[in-house]
Every structure is written in structure tokens, then in C-alpha cells.
Amino acid sequence: MPKVKIPRKSTSVDMTAMCDVAFLLLSFFILTTKFKPSEALKVTTPSSVATKIAPDKDVVLITLDRDGKVFLSVSDQNKTQKEKILDEINTSKNLGLTPAEKQNFVKFPSSYIGVPFSQLKSYLGHTPDELKNVTLAGIPVKDSSNNELVDWVHAAVTAFEGTRFNLLVKGDDAAKYPSFQGIIRAFKKNDQMKFSMVTNPVAVPTGTELYKINMAAPQNKGAAAE
Amino acid sequence: MAELDTSSGGGHKKGPGVKKGKKLSTRVDLTPMVDLGFLLITFFIFTTTMSQPTAMKLFLPKDVDKPEEQNKVKASAVLTIMLGKNDQVYYYEGDDPTKVQGSNFKAIRDVILDKKRRTDPKDFVVVLKPTVDATYKNTVNILDEMTIDAVKRFALVDISPDEYKIVQATEQANGIK
């Protein structure tokens, strides 16, 4: 038998097409990516079928951590309101904050208040970075006679001067109800009857009433879920 | 792999006396570039946050002190849901809290839908009363349940001491700590 010569083919493949795809995907992900802001407060939010994206402008955010401690922060775009809120509390509670202490709250992005009024001055004496490893007491809310969040929400309402702002509550799964109740009371006392809760989106369970509504009117899908 | 392919240079004949310039191929090995591309893709896939947090709206009822200004509801059209320890749900129909029945977050959907079917949609109201033992997650879940079951009228109300006692007694009887 004569040997059959099998022509040897080169193993190198043309990479151009693959390269194209790779960089197309790469540019897509670079453009769509939004880095998670580093959070000093670790909060696992519950999930809901709500479809409205949480706003990020004009936000007064009340964070409720797993131990039921309450923290207050203002969105970074609203520096003037942030300052006004602190001014308001400063004058009404006679805390005697220095401008430097105020700047520690106003200047730093994602800074939050998490102490009772009595500790506020010493708390604001430090930069947020210095306070990373300090356990904070949270704003007192559980006791209805000493609900300090009432004053904070009042200050926020005054600072936004009647313009629309978004009250957001971001709570942890494990937080107990009394803290949340305290937050609700603080809103009610200030006539803030509308607020939103930050949640993770989940799909509507199939076969439920809302599912049927959404199926019947796909053009305004999720309208009922808001 | 990482070499320039120079073998397939200049193929066609030129006229006599014309010197053949050695042509370099323009083909480059793209493998390292693809490697790098996919490495970066993996990085961005892992760091990206595709699902943005959503906001669930809640409207609070106004506290009214005078009884004549309060909203009147038919007692028979009310379903009261109480949230207890360990994700337990208790409910009763009407205005008699002693008729409380135990349930959980899965089964409560059928209870709500069953009650909804039996009552006039004009009157149907669900009253939500989380106890101090309930978590924030429970509260959000039951509010979400209202949306899922398309319950138009519901209210988040503080629990009365009597009702809380009944819930506690039921929990003790069921051995829930």
C-alpha cells in the first residue's frame, strides 16, 4: 500500500472575528458598568415586585441596618440642602457646631448621620474615614417620646423648602419592626405621607392577580406594581 | 503563536529587470489581544451592577383622633393580618381577634384571594399589623403581597395590646420561640 499523504493544515485560526466580538462586548460592558459605591453600611434589602427604579436625585435616605439602628443621609448632588439640614438642627438644638465640623458632613460624599444629638458634635469632629471602624448608636427612633428622627425629617422638609424630594427608606432584612415603626411615625409627624422603600426587583409570580393584570395590558406593564 | 507570518509575501511576477521587493505580510497574530479582551470582559461582567434597586411606594394614612372623621369600614369586609416571630403570619376576618388563625407567607396569598372573592370589592380592606417581633423583611413582603394580589385598600396599622397578647399566646401554644 502506498502511503497516503495527509496534507498538514496549519492549526492557527484567524482570530480577527473573535477579536471583534471580544472588543464589542468589552466596550458594551465598559459603557454600561456602574461601579458599586463603597458602602460603609452593609444593608441587604428585601425584594419586591416594584418596577420603578429608585431615584438618586433629591433624596433623603433613611438607612435601617440589621440591628435596627437608623442613619440619615442626603444625596450627594444636594450639598446646599445637606448644609441647611445641619444648620437647622444646629440652631434648633443649640449644638454649637463649628464650620469645620459642618464641612465634615457636607463635603464628604455618602456621609451619614448616625448618632443622637448629644453625640453629634464629637461625631462631626471626625472625618467619615476616621469613623469607619467606630460602632455608631444610630438616631434614636424607637421611643416615641424621644424620636429624634422627627427633628431630622422636619429639618429636611425645611431645607428642601417645599420642593419635591424623595424620602427613601433602605432597610435590612433582619431589622425588627419597631425601628421601622419609629421611622413611619417620624414621617407622619411631619406630614410626609408618601415615601418609598428601596428593594431588589423580582419577577411577578406567575398566575397571580398582578401577573394577570400585567399580561392583559403589556404596554403599561408594572404600572400597578408601583 | 506569537510570530509574524512572513512567508506568504509577494506572489506575482513583475517584468524582467524589476527587482522583487520583499513584501511583509500584514497579518498579525491576534491571540494575545483576544486573551486580553476576554480578560477585561470577565472583569467588567463581574463588577457591573445590572439590576438597579427599585423603589416601592407606600402611602401612609393620616392619623385621625376624632372617631367621626375616621374611615368607616364594614367589619365583615376586613381581613386583618398580623406578623409574628419567625416569619409567622396570623389572620382573622371581621372584628373578632380571638378567631385568629395561623399561616405563613406562602399560604397567606390564598387566604387573601379567598377573602377577596367572597367580599364586595367596594368594601374589601386588608389591615396589616406587624408585631414588634416581625422583621422589616416581613413587613415589606406583606406590603408586596398587597401589590401582587391587587388589593386596592390596605393599611399598615399599629397592633393593639390585646391582639398582641393573642398572637403571643398562639405562638406559645405552637412552640414558636
Image (cartoon, coloured by chain):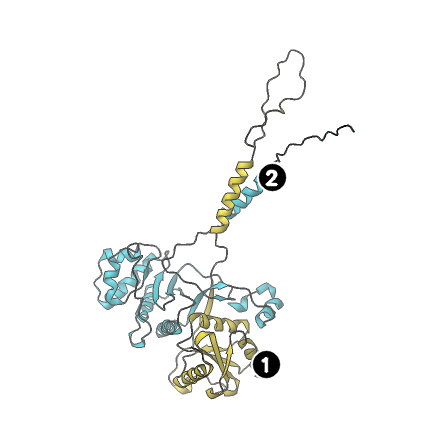
Chain colours: A cyan, B yellow
Position of residue B160 in the picture relative to residue A29 (left or right): left
Residue that appears at 55% across and 45% down: A25
> Where residue A183 sits: x, y (%)?
37, 71
Circle 2: is it few (<14), some (14-19), or many (20+) Cα within 10 Å?
Answer: few
In this figure, which residue is indicated by the disc labeled 2? A17
Q: Secondary structure at mark 1?
A: helix
Q: Secondary structure at mark 2?
A: helix
> Where residue A122 sits: x, y (%)?
23, 61
Q: Amino acid at mark 1?
A: Arg
Name the image quarter holding residue B22. Answer: top right
Q: Amino acid at mark 2?
A: Ala
Position of residue A174 in the picture relative to residue B117 (left or right): left
Name the image quarter holding residue A11. Answer: top right
Q: Chain of mark 1?
A: B
Q: Mark 1 touching mark 2, by CB under 8 A?
A: no
Name the image quarter holding residue A152. Answer: bottom left
Circle 1: is it few (<14), some (14-19), or many (20+) Cα within 10 Å?
Answer: few
- Looking at the image, which residue sits at the far right? A1
Q: Nearer the viewer, mark 1 or mark 2?
A: 2
In this figure, which residue is indicated by the disc labeled 1? B117
Residue that appears at 38% across and 57% down: A39
* Whether labels 1 and 2 share one chain: no
> Where residue A213 sits: x, y (%)?
59, 70
Residue that appears at 39% across and 84% down: B161
